[in-house]
Each structure stands twice: as C-alpha cells, then as structure tokens.
C-alpha cells in the first residue's frame, strides 16, 4: 500500500452514510399528572414520554415513574414548604397519569435545622400495616 493512501475511502466510503440528526422532542408527547384526591390541587404537573412506536407503548413507559413534589404546592399552604411528597404513577387514562403516594421526606435545610450539637438524636424505624392492607414504614 502506498504512503498517504486511504484504503477505506477508495472502496466507496462509509456504509449507510451519515444519519440525519432530528429533534428528539418531535417524538415526545406531554401527559398531565394528577395527584391523589387527598391533596387540594389535583393537576400538579406534566411529564414527557416518547410516542408509542412498535412494541414500546407510551403508557407502559410512564408506569412506575416516581415524582417529587412540594407539599406546599399540593395543598396551597406555605407552612408545609419543608415537606417533599413522592408520588408514583400507577395508571394512565388517556393523557392523564394517576398517581399514588410513594413517600414523604423533609428538605435538607429543615433536617439541618433540627439536628443540633450537644443534643441526643434518637432514630427509630418501624413497619406498620394499615387496616386497608398497606405497609407503611415510620422513621
């Protein structure tokens, strides 16, 4: 082979050519998120999902997603701004995603304000089964 000769380009170039780069958001759909009825605000947000194509169904991709929302936004009460609620998408009806309670945490600044020097911190974890069959972990 001669010096400076590119063997691959002489045989017709790359196979398939360059793939045309399209906007990925053109293949997405917006779905509304509905909070459980215990909260005063039912419409709590929107989420994106890739359109149904072949065996990939959009509603199946949404199920199981976990969302983290501020409790002050869900109840229109600014006194609860330090609590974060986690909601899990359980069911998709049309363009609406129905959610269920998944957890509750405190914001980092609230936790840091509760922990003080020279005070004993007691931690406890217990699993409780409710009358309707749910298992709730209290800590």
Image (spheres, rainbow, N blue to C red):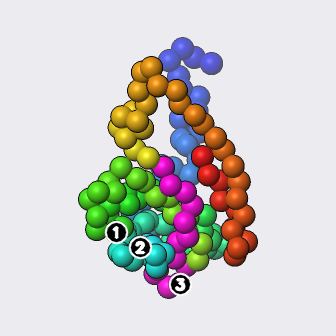
**Residue 93 — which label?**
3
Q: Badge 3, how many Cα within 10 Å: few under 14, some, many 20+? A: few
Magenta part, dominant SS: strand
Q: Residue at x 70, y 59 (%)?
A: 128
Looking at marks 3 and 2 on the same chain, the residue that comes earlier in the sequence is marked by: 2
Q: In this rendering, is residue 3 above or below 131?
A: above
User: Badge 1 is on which residue?
Assistant: 75
Pick the front one: 112 or 62: 112
Q: Earlier in the sequence, mark 1 or mark 3?
A: 1
Residue 39 is marked as 2
Residue bounds of the magenta highlight: 92-105
Give residue 108's quadrant in the image: top left
Determine whether, in the image, residue 30 is placed left or right of residue 56: left
Give the CA distance from mark 3 to mark 2. Answer: 19 Å
Q: Are marks 1 and 3 in contact (CB under 8 Å)?
A: no
Reply above or below: 60 against 18: below
Q: Quadrant of residue 60?
A: bottom right
Gap between marks 1 and 3, in whole Å?
24 Å
State the image coordinates of residue 134 (x, y, percent, origin top left).
69, 68
**Residue extending furthest front?**
119
Question: In terms of sequence position, does the residue under pointer 2 or pointer 1 come before the other?
Answer: 2
Find residue 52 and report its horizontal and vertical position in percent: 56, 74
What percent of the width, then of the height, locates residue 61?
59, 66
Mark 3 in CB contact with mark 2 (< 8 angstroms):
no
As drawn, 114 above or below 37? above
Question: Label 2's element?
Answer: loop
Please report the residue visible at 48 percent of the width from the left and 66 percent of the height from the top. Answer: 49
- The answer to the question of whether label 2 and label 1 lie on touching residues, with beta carbons closer than 8 A, is yes
For the residue pair 9 and 39, the one nearer the viewer reads as 39
Q: Is residue 8 magenta?
A: no
């Amino acid at each position: 082979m001669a010096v400076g000769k590119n063997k691959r380009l002489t045989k017709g170039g790359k196979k398939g050519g360059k793939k045309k780069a399209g906007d990925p958001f053109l293949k997405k759909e917006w779905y509304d998120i509905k909070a459980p009825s215990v909260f005063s605000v039912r419409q709590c947000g929107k989420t994106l999902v890739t359109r149904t194509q072949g065996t990939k169904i959009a509603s199946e991709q949404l199920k199981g997603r976990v969302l983290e929302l501020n409790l002050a936004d869900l109840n229109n009460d600014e006194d609860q701004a330090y609590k974060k609620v986690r909601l899990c998408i359980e069911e998709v009806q049309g363009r609406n995603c129905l959610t269920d309670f998944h957890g509750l945490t405190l914001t980092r600044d609230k936790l840091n304000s509760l922990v003080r020097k020279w005070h004993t911190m007691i931690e406890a974890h217990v699993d409780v089964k409710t009358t309707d069959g749910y298992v709730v972990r209290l800590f």
